Amino acid sequence: MRTIEVFDTTLRDGLQVEGVSATVDDKLRIAEQLDFLGVQFIEGGWPGANPKDIEFFARAATELRLDSSTLVAFGSTRRPKGKVDDDVTLRNLLDANTSAVCIVAKSWDYHVLNALQTTLDEGAAMIADSVEFLVANGRRVLVDMEHFFDGYKRNPEFAMRAIESAVVKGASHLVLCDTNGGSLPHEVESIVGDVVRLVGSDAIVGIHCHDDTGCAVANSMASVLAGARHVQGTLNGLGERTGNCNLTTVIPNLQLKLGMQCLPDGRLERLTAVSKHVAEVLNRPLDPQAPYVGSSAFAHKAGLHVSAIARAKDAYEHVDPELVGNGTRFVVSEMAGRATIQMKADELGLAMDGPAVNQVIDDLKRLEHEGFHFEAADASLELLMRRAAGWEQQYFRVESMRVITDELPSGQFTTEATVKVWVGEGESAVRHVHTAEGNGPVNAIDSALRAALGAAYPQLARVHLTDYKVRILDGATATGAITRVLIDATDGERSWTTIGVSSNIIEASWRALEEGLVYSLLHATPSAVSE
Ligand SMILES: [Zn+2]
């Protein structure tokens, strides 16, 4: 089986994405996840470009225990007309103290002449000198050939000279970068083929694609088919503009479709969990439609073929979802028939008899008519099905909830909520009353409810809301219309969505919040409870 190296640059290129900022702690946690997944290389950042990355490498040296991955520091070639020994960038690279380094080099003549304002001879010398210096200092040196495809199309001679300058000085990898992301698979395949023939067995040829044409994964696969043995990308395709090559797509493509080994044995099934975990750390929700790892990737909407899916799942799924740690999911709506409800019950591990199934069908029809939408709220659906089967939540009983918003003479708004709940049964039930402030009514009732339940259920401290969506269902009556609220929450391991519908937005939010906490208590792991 052919082996393909996976080089993850989530912590460097991936963090260029708009609206994301990661602390050093976040970066360390992501690096642990990448090692758990088993990628070969983790590019940790650019020491010298910012103090955060210097701190990352310093702490990584003592705090990170990597079993599968090699940590890589990123930098660039020496500056034009400079000397390697007193070059600050190269010095910072060595100070990061990693066994491997990756430097970016200019392989497009246009950039050398215009951006660096130097000669092509000096451009080639910058690459050769820098690689030689780093190799002499005991580093494995990967060279990112920036703008390689654009450069090769305009001046193939200089692009190949840049490659040779790195190879003769001992670079281990030549990574061809589609930095502007504008290339297409047929171009990439042909150019990578040319480079592989030139380099032969002197170094490994790699590929680094951006997704500006929506082809980053396709381009990476075309490169591998043309002989590249090293693929760079990011988890969930994070990266500036339209993102980088998505490793959560390209890894299973290479491994499951082309039979190439990208991760150590037994690691591919961690893919979905790692993808979710990283989305969570960066507070960047995962696209439900992401191939392989998205929550909809193996979701089947109820229809005529639902019983056929039950008989032959593989007739409707391109791979077994368990291979990537995902699972088949049946999407249930008012259109669902008995077979769908029964399959959903099996998926949830619920025993449901005929009358209970009929009850669910009746409830769904009635509630969806009122404005509920259970396709989007799996947790509320599960609670509804459990109730139809005779289950009642025993965790708490709400006596009352009140929320007040005041506008002060200064023009400032304050919001305060009071929640009264009972925890426990009969004589031994305990009443908890809590008041909390919030930056708005939903935030205040959420805080007050958790505070009221916190003493009895400390595990709720782990739960936090990740999204709050409001939709007005009947636009014609404007503020008098029905409001549908969807709340996404997570406890760090599991994520869920609950729904509330009412003509009162606070009531709709409250129902969704309450169900979200019930769901989290229902699924709290024993270890979480005892903490
Ligand atoms: Zn890049």
Image (cartoon, rainbow, N blue to C red):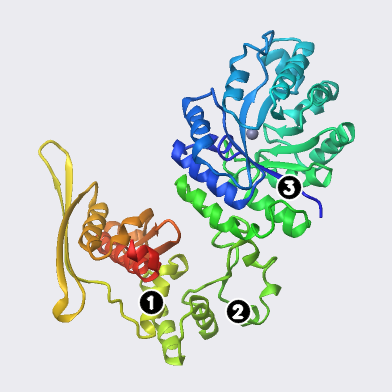
Amino acid type of disc 1?
A: Leu
The residue that mark 1 highlights is: 384
Q: Nearer the viewer, mark 2 or mark 1?
A: 1
Amino acid type of disc 2?
A: Val
Would residue 127 be seen by someone viewing this image from the given angle? yes
Q: Nearer the viewer, mark 3 or mark 2?
A: 3
- For residue 303, which numbered disc appears in the image? none
- Give residue 75's position: percent from left, percent from top: 62, 25
Quarter of the image with the N terminus is: bottom right
Question: Most extreme residue toward the bottom, as rendered?
Answer: 354
Label 3: element kind: helix
Measuring 63% from the left and 57% from the top, which residue is drawn there?
291
Label 1: element kind: helix
Label 2: element kind: helix
- Between the residue at mark 2 and the residue at mark 1, the CA separation in whole angstroms equals 21 Å
The residue that mark 3 highlights is: 218
Left of 342 or right of it: where is 245?
right
Left of 400 or right of it: where is 158?
right
48 and 442: which is toward the camera: 48
Is label 2 in contact with label 1 (beta carbons under 8 Å)? no
The local crowd at label 2, few if under 14, some if 14 to 19, many if 20 or more residues have their Cα within 10 Å, is many
Q: Earlier in the sequence, mark 3 or mark 1?
A: 3
Is label 3 in contact with label 2 (beta carbons under 8 Å)? no
- Between the residue at mark 3 and the residue at mark 1, the CA separation in whole angstroms equals 42 Å
Quadrant of the rendered image containing residue 364: bottom left
- Split into quadrants, the picture shows ligand 1 in the one at top right
The residue that mark 2 highlights is: 306
Question: Most extreme residue toward the top, as rendered?
Answer: 81
- Give residue 425's position: percent from left, percent from top: 20, 79
Question: Most extreme residue toward the left, as rendered?
Answer: 409
Amino acid type of disc 3?
A: Ala
